[in-house]
Amino acid sequence: MQILRPDAVLFVGDLSDGDLRLTRRITRLPFPVAVILGNHDRGRDRSGGILEQQLAVLGDLHCAWRAIQWPELPLTIVGARPCSAGGGFHLSNAVEAVYGPVSLEASADRIVQAAAGVPADQPLIVMAHCGPTGLGSDAASPCGRDWKTPAVDWGDQDLALALDRMARNRPADLVIFGHMHHALKRGSGLRQNLLRHRHGTALINAACVPRSGLDGQDRPLLHLSWAEFQGSQLTQLAHHWYTSDAELIHQEQLPMDASSSC
């Protein structure tokens, strides 16, 4: 990571099943960092205690329902709902214990309000644990349910609503999420994970699991999702696979035109 020298590093959640060791390591990274916690990050604790510990470790690095800005970077990250498990809209007992009851409409409003403060000369980037509804209901759709039949759209309704409301003034340039693993259940292929949606918004599902492994030559490879901007213009959105010495071995890119629209 140090060799690649990214301007910022974003974590889309499911860091661990409530284990704080990786969370603490993330806070020590020598880069601007933003995190949105996933459903696994609350552990099996329904009381919200583990979630509160995670939030205490992360502090201002956690972007749920708020925006993170860095004075040294022309970049703002807008966070969606924390600890989403997909499937429409649902707050777990742990999330409700920490944040209180939040309705679908209120959650969407919070995301929209956070986005309203993004400067016009910066990209509007929304980070979520699970992607929005409206991306398809097949098992291989970006948020399609592949572990149970029938396949359905398993995205977040509040995020979809927020993106539509934001588009009345300014569409999001990029939505980054995870949760839905690239490899489908029972070896039935890969899900769509790079696309351009309505309003021209680009989306990337970063949930390549596992993130590290070996290639055909037994070389260790690491997967990173990668975005580049010039001003507020998205110029590259891709999945990259690197060797341990940061050599780029393989990449999959979203074409920078409307031909990849969903």
Image (tube, rainbow, N blue to C red):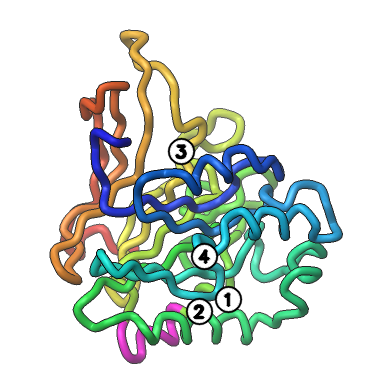
**12 over 213 or under it: above or below:** below
Badge 3 is on which residue? 208
Q: Earlier in the sequence, mark 1 or mark 4?
A: 4
Q: Of discs 3 and 4, which sits in the foreground?
A: 4
Q: Which residues make up the magenta segment?
A: 163-170
Question: Which residue was labeled with disc 2?
Answer: 111
Of the two numbered discs 3 and 2 on the same chain, state the one appearing first in sequence. Answer: 2
Q: Earlier in the sequence, mark 4 or mark 2?
A: 4
Residue beneath disc 1? 158
Left or right, 96 with reference to 180: right
Q: Nearer the viewer, mark 4 or mark 2?
A: 4
Judged left or right of residue 258, residue 145 is right
Q: CA–CA distance between discs 1 and 2? A: 9 Å
* Res. 208 in view: yes
* Secondary structure of the residue carrying numbered label 4: helix
Provide residue 55's location: percent of width, then percent of height: 64, 59
